[in-house]
Image: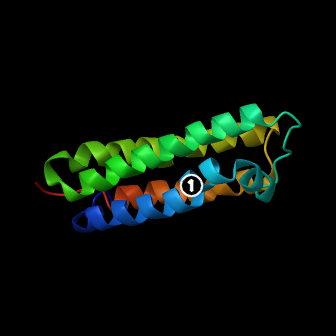
Amino acid sequence: MIGLLGSHAPAFVLVFAAISSLVFGLPFILAPEGWGRAMGWRVPRDRDLLAYYARCLGLLTLSVNAYAAWAALHRPVMLIGYFIMLTLFSASMVPLHIYGWLRGEQPWTETAEIPVWAGVFVACLLFFPSGG
């Protein structure tokens, strides 16, 4: 299973980087309160900290996606970019969302992301870069 579709790894990384930038990165930066409400979070009265952390997370998302996209286009470093994407955007998201669910600290929409991130992890394994 690992690397079964590895020859398509660069395309997978580029598509994932674009989608996660549009769904997460930019909304976190441009409309953190609106994104939070849409996901079912209670937005606190003091929104400065919320906006700050959302902008930080959004810029981190865009930075990782930009590096992953660059790495996908430069074969010698693609594996490094792929590992960053695999760990940050798939493998770590499953336990993070399970933890929030078990503690009852997140809206249902975040809990619903558990199978989504698990699916992304499986896709990452399927598209794992193959060959040299």
Residue 104's image quarter? top right
| Count of number-bearing discs | 1
Q: Quadrant of the N terminus?
A: bottom left
The location of residue 125, given as percent across then percent down, is 37, 55
Residue 5 makes an appearance in the image = no
Taking the image as shown, residue 16 lies to the left or right of residue 34, namely left
**Residue at figure coordinates x 27%, y 59% from the top left:** 3
Tell me: residue 99, above or below residue 85: above
**Residue at figure coordinates x 26%, y 42% from the top left:** 80
Residue 127's image quarter? bottom left
Q: Which colour style is shown?
A: rainbow
The amino acid type of the residue labelled 1 equals Leu
Tell me: residue 13, above or below residue 101: below
Q: Residues within 10 Å of mark 1 (few under 14, many from 20)?
A: some
Taking the image as shown, residue 78 lies to the left or right of residue 37, namely left
**Residue at figure coordinates x 70%, y 48% from the top left:** 32
The location of residue 99, given as percent across then percent down, is 69, 37
Which residue occupies the extreme right position in the image? 45
Tell me: residue 58, above or below residue 11: above
Taking the image as shown, residue 126 lies to the left or right of residue 89, namely left
Residue matched to label 1: 26
Residue 68 makes an appearance in the image = yes
Q: Secondary structure at mark 1?
A: helix
The location of residue 86, given as percent across then percent down, is 40, 47
The location of residue 94, given as percent across then percent down, is 58, 46
Q: Quadrant of the C terminus?
A: bottom left
Residue 87's image quarter? top left
